[in-house]
Amino acid sequence: MVETIQWTPAGVVMIDQTKLPRETVFVTCKNYEEVAEAIRSMIIRGAPAIGVAAAMGVAIGVGQASEANLDAQFEAICNTLAGTRPTAVNLFWAIDRMKRLYAGHRGKPIAEIRAVLTAEAQEIYHEDIAICKRIGAHGAGLVPDGKTVLTHCNAGALATAGYGTALGVIRAAVEAGKKIDVFADETRPFLQGARLTAWELMEDGIPTTLITDNMAGHFMKAGRIGCVVVGADRIAANGDVANKVGTYTVAVLAKENGVPFYVAAPISTLDLTLATGDLIPIEERSAAEVTHVFGVEIAPKGVGVENPAFDVTPNRYVTGIITERGVATAPFEQSLRALVGK
Ligand code: MRU
């Protein structure tokens, strides 16, 4: 299994996801500023992986800090990391968890604070893998045997500390002996499906077919898709789901064609402070991601461009939300709160 991110004595080591699959290159972030830049530039991406990276960024930042004015330095570290990407709530969840721990250790010797925060970041990493395995265990039964699963973007080992959420469900179904194959949407403009999902599933020997995003409806209408499983960046209290742009289109097509549409995500992706998905902040990324493909300009200079990185799928399109604590179904206001309360 690929190592997405690791805490090492030399720094936080990440596989560079902007280079996959052509090159397998690892980068070492030696300070929190480099961790923040790795998140912003999508060397590491995917909601749970961003959370793990942020926690490690906080820990490495406290390692850089001096004893005098530690509170102010800690706040600056957290603010820098929190300012990288706005949509995936796991980023803020992880930083808040580190903040709570810091608050409980304020005034103690800096060496002790460093040790506690470093241990917590590693704990978040290990927990994330265990959570993905439990998501897989809850979801495997929902995947129809002998059928094709469609996924969008990359919600795999590369998007988590390991194993994946949506791809964790697929992996668990395969491990349970189901004969399934995967259709991966290429996921324009950043091509997470073509570059990352196809790569990691092929590494695992799971049969994978790459399609462009606009082909999904064609294959659903032809009865070729057994179910859809995607990840999430933030889920509102009513079950509206923010995920990679294009997910909403897939969900509408799935409902129209009677194909079950599942979202696989850890509890840390729930944001019950937001009543509906309309309140989820949507990251706008650079126009160059749309006008250029691997540095080659494909559109006329000066054309207007919009590049929202995520969209929101209303809860009515969601068949079930697969978490590490079980599967939530409509009405999501109740079912999600019940899972959180567990
Ligand atoms: O912009 P990205 O690549 O960070 O977007 C990733 C997604 O949308 C994933 O589906 C989501 O974060 C879930 S990852 C388990």
Image (spheres, helix red, strand yellow):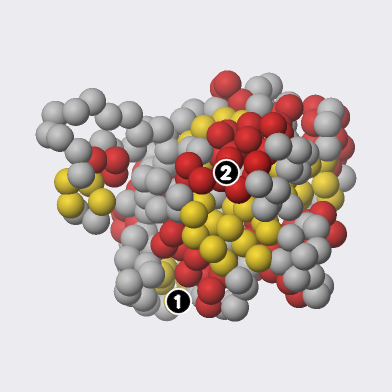
Residue indicated by mark 2: 218
Q: Circle 1 sits in a helix, a strand or a loop, which is it?
A: strand
- 242 vs 270, left or right, is left
Q: CA distance from mark 1 to mark 2?
A: 46 Å
Q: Circle 2 sits in a helix, a strand or a loop, which is it?
A: helix
Of residues 8 and 98, which is closer to you in this image?
A: 8
Of residues 236 and 117, which is closer to you in this image?
A: 236
Query: Is residue 105 visible to the viewer in this orientation of the structure?
Result: no
Q: Residue 75: x, y in percent?
A: 43, 42
Q: Nearer the viewer, mark 1 or mark 2?
A: 2
Question: Which dot marks residue 263?
Answer: none
- Residue 3 to residue 312: above or below: below
Query: Is residue 276 visible to the viewer in this orientation of the structure?
Result: yes
Residue at horizontal 84 percent and vertical 50 percent from the top: 326
- 258 vs 92, left or right, is right
Q: Is mark 1 within 8 Å of ligand 1?
A: no
For this orientation, the residue located farthest to the left is 301
Instruction: Name the amino acid type tagged 1.
Output: Thr
The quadrant the N terminus occupies is bottom right
Residue 274, quarter of the rendered image = top right
- 314 vs 96, left or right, is right
The quadrant the C terminus occupies is top right
Residue indicated by mark 1: 8
Residue at horizontal 61 percent and vertical 26 percent from the top: 277
- Of mark 1 and mark 2, the one earlier in the sequence is 1
Residue at horizontal 49 percent and vertical 28 percent from the top: 281
